[in-house]
Amino acid sequence: MSAAPTKPTVTEREAREVAEAAREQDWRKPSFAKELFLGRFRLDLIHPHPMPPTEDAQRGEEFLAKLRDFCESKVDGALIEREARIPDEVVTGLKELGALGMKIDTKYGGLGLTQVYYNKALSLAGSASPAIGVLLSAHQSIGVPQPLKLFGTPEQKEQFLPRCARTDISAFLLTEPDVGSDPARLATSAVPDGDDYVLDGVKLWTTNGVVADLLVVMARVPKSEGHKGGITAFVVETNSPGVTVENRNAFLGLRGIENGVTRFHQVRVPAAHRIGPEGAGLKIALTTLNTGRLSLPASCVAAGKWCLKIAREWSAAREQWGKPIAHHEAVGSKISFIAATTFALEAVLDLSSQMADEDRNDIRIEGALAKLYASEMAWLVADELVQIRGGRGFETAESLRARGERAVPAEQVLRDLRINRIFEGSTEIMHLLIAREAVDAHLSVAGDLIDPDKSLGDKAKAGANAGVFYAKWLPKLVAGPGQLPNSYSEFKREVDLSGHLRYVERTARKLARSTFYAMSRWQGRMETKQGFLGRIVDIGAELFAMSAACVRAELLRSTEAHGREAYQLADVFCRQSRVRVEELFGRLWNNTDDLDRTVVKGVLSGTYTWLEDGIVDPSGDGPWIADATPGPSQKENVHRPIR
């Protein structure tokens, strides 16, 4: 057996090439968000709002009723927060309820819920305890069930899915102490040895890893005769010899999650447990995340609903200067923001989820936008609730209870939500990921023009292709339905939403023109303009949210009793969103990006160290990044399977 490879050293370009190779290259289905970034407002792709089949809805509602009863009677969120652990009997109860198999097909013992009802269940469970929401989503959204559903063999599904549906908790292991969003540097190795692979390496932040029975592990297979090599996905039994859970990590929020550090030393994994071919690991991970990311917006929607409830009740009860604080404009504007944003977040989540269920559209951008937008906006919602609660918002629920007041965990929600801006792709990485997909049409026809490594012949061919594409595309960005006063008239009711949709159509074309201008201006340097790209994506996210809010309002008007109120919330949200969009457009070209880069160089070179004088650093000693050299574990195994 050959020795395990050392940690790879890669250039920035090589890292980008690895990420690019893992992308889904083709667009075989339409995408509302992709069209939006190209300046084409395809309302027909999302309106009328897609709906689940009656039998799926009935099955989902029946499970939600059981889950609600369980959460109300068996889950003590304060206890989980206080003891930083979900009681074993709660996990056992969730298993008996079938909650581990919500997304697993019924033929494997699962409940076979749709994405829509799976997310509703995560919202419900997460409102009782965010740690439970994380346990269930990490297990099903990115753990063993989802990759096997998409890429597993029939034998693998038969072997593992029944276990995942009822008894076994799973986890997803990609991150390493020195590898985050740059998987090209992945160091964990899987060396072929007969009918097995031998795993060596260390994985960090393994959510569910402390209690998991099964793991999805990403490891690098060295290229050799008969082996393509590359980053590859494996199903690993946690009780295999050589697997050690070395630490249970503790965090700012989500104190009940079972997140750890896992070491692999000479762990033998049968080749039959490899998911997909060698080298397909990153593609499997990214494809899994296309819908897996929707679990985070589900937790954000739950938090928004709770924040709205507390803001309403508290702001009516608390009086200042002779009237409830809700009637003071400074507080009322915050309540309006919370209500309107919560409505929009649920609209984005339900629309994206139903589109995922229908499988009629490619939702890779919609899913990423939902994760990005929900994680950022929910954090603002929770922050506003803390502000509305004042000193009580900063005080813990336990302290409030101890002195005789309602134990409202506002500060906990703020802490719990903070990780969503980092989980499963940080906001900064999501900006770059979405931006890459948004400009895919441009790069497919003009990419060689801005690639310094391409030959003159390649550039000439790309120039000809680009000329044909832009000759057809650019004229369509000049005018559209958004300039016609009667467009989208079906959204004109007592409250008129048609103007907002016309705004989305006009602004989508403006966004596409801005992107084209930036590509013309910066060409190959465009990928370094991360501030600009982030604002482009944020504008697109607002336009997507506005579209979803309007479509949801019309759905509720036609199917439920809250149509008038839904129109009001959609109207307020769109007006608030438009203010943010105009600010973002202003910052496309009027910003401090260049000055910021100058300051960063000064900070890193030590130019401003005098500014750090006058403090004491309370940090402990130790390396910035823990040593992850392969080898046998020197620590106690804290793996704690729940049976």
Image (cartoon, rainbow, N blue to C red):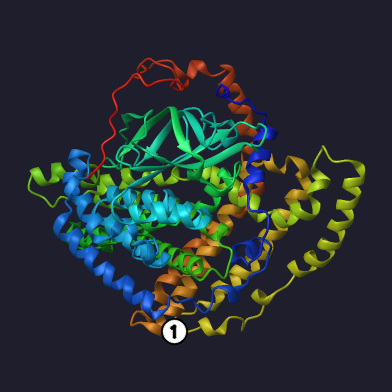
The image shows residue 542, relative to residue 237, as above or below, that is below
- In front: 449, or 532? 449
Left or right: where 130 falls relative to 233: left
Q: Quadrant of the N terminus?
A: top right
Q: Position of residue 591 (x, y in %)?
A: 62, 43
- Residue at point 74%, 67% (across, down): 477
The image shows residue 639, relative to residue 6, as above or below, that is below
Using the rendered view, name the quadrant where residue 61 is placed.
bottom left
Q: Position of residue 441 (x, y in %)?
A: 72, 57
- Residue at point 51%, 30% (across, down): 188
The image shows residue 352, relative to residue 228, as above or below, that is below
Disc 1 crowd, CA 10 A, few/some/many (<14, 14-19, 20+): few
Q: Quadrant of the C terminus?
A: top left
The image shows residue 227, relative to residue 384, as above or below, that is above
- In front: 612, or 541? 541
Q: Position of residue 492 (x, y in %)?
A: 51, 83
Q: Position of residue 381 (x, y in %)?
A: 36, 54
- In front: 326, or 508? 508
Residue corresponding to mark 1: 494
